Amino acid sequence: MKIYGTLFIILLLGIGSFVGFSNPPRNQEPVQNTTQAFNTMMKVVTHKRCMNCHPNGDRPRQGEDSHIHNFNVQRGDDGHGTAALKCSTCHQKANNDNSGVPGAPHWHLAPISMAWEGLSDAEIARRIIDTKFNGDRSIEEIEKHMTEDDLVLWAFDPGVNNEGIPREKPPVSEKDYIQAVKEWIAGGAQIPEQ
Amino acid sequence: MKIQFNINGKAVSVDEDARTPLLWVVRDVLDLKGTKFGCGKAACGACTLHVNGEAVRSCSFPVEYAEGKEITTIEGLAKGDQLHPVQQAWMEEIVPQCGYCQPGFMMSTAALLDKIPNPTDQDIDDNIANICRCGTYYRMRKAIHRAAEIKNTPS
């Protein structure tokens, strides 16, 4: 019996090492349970529909090729553009499929602290949950922002461009994205090492 | 859809498709032809007017969003016989060539001077993004500085 017991413990340790939950954070789901949710979420977060307005400089990007926004458009003091060339000079509360100008409520650039351009998935995720970067948002506020904010969810209904061609959507449905964000956060917002 | 707003200080009510660009309501319904159609894509700025004091590209601004707002077009920039400083400066510097884009530039400039009374060249570059195919930018820059002088001089 002693030998069988020892073998059983060794077997358990072996399985634990193999699947990677040898050191799960306390009171949280094992890492592998949220890795898939994390990866699903990041497919949206790193898509151009999101990244174009999370630049690491003072100029937004636009288009499928993420070129620097035409017309010298700039961040301005508050992310809403310069004094007389605001985002709302052209962008309104909804997509304009006649002119091809995209729109959503409070259209603006993410703050520079939330610049994602050039970062890895893990680095982006760390900024998302770090109150020093994310505008002092709690994890609950982050979940609400990521799953309910009309400007965030615009990515799934991006309208047409100025040639009438539908803009590319993220490779994940809105429903799956929202579910993934909620699962990731419910699992402790763990960030897989890459 | 009935939409009510003030334009150049006058209350108006229009009955149009909510998605109709404000530009076409201003030009074709209210018969104010100073605001021009250029690209129709909010890119060139020829259609610029003010909505509650902010410069807006009216070709891409559905009229429904004008409900209850104060709209100002180039026709409403002057106060009676007193030309707006931007209009005075534009005449002094003989800015226009063909003139088509100029109302949009003047409305953008008027909005800029309301926010930044003494704009630097950098401020002008950062805030005036309209397009002039005649290339009158050099004269416009001079006129913008001159308009600031006029506006800041006590009458």
Image (cartoon, coloured by chain):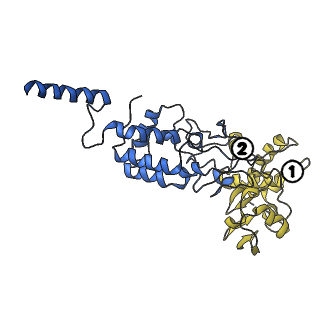
Q: Give whichever of B120, A100 is nearer the camera.
A: A100
Residue type beneath disc 1: Glu
Residue B126 percent location from the top left of the image: 68, 42
Instruction: Evaluate whether label 1 is on the same chain as label 2.
Output: yes
For the C terminus of chain A, the quadrant is: top left
Above or below residue A44? Residue B86 is below
Residue A138 visible in the displayed image: no
Task: Look at 48% across and 31% down and name the residue there.
Answer: A120
The chain containing the residue under callout 2 comes to B
Left or right position of A38 against B34: left
Above or below residue A99? Residue A73 is above
Residue A157 visible in the displayed image: yes
The residue identified by callout 2 is B124
Number of marks in the rendered image: 2
* Earlier sequence position, callout 1 versus callout 2: 1
Per the image, label 1 sits on a secondary structure element best described as helix
Residue A118 percent location from the top left of the image: 53, 31
> Chain drawn blue, letter?
A
Above or below residue A104? Residue B8 is below
| Disc 1: CA contacts within 10 A as few (<14), some (14-19) or many (>=20) | few
Marks 1 and 2, Cα distance to the nearest angstrom? 19 Å
Above or below residue A29? Residue A19 is above
In the rendered structure, are the residues bearing label 1 and label 2 in contact, judged by CB atoms less than 8 Å apart?
Answer: no
Task: Look at 26% across and 31% down and name the residue there.
Answer: A22
Residue A74 badge: none
Residue type beneath disc 2: Ile
Residue A6 percent location from the top left of the image: 13, 25
The residue identified by callout 1 is B92
> Chain drawn yellow, letter?
B
Q: Tell me the quarter of the picture where residue B155 sits.
A: bottom right
Residue A175 percent location from the top left of the image: 50, 51
The chain containing the residue under callout 1 comes to B
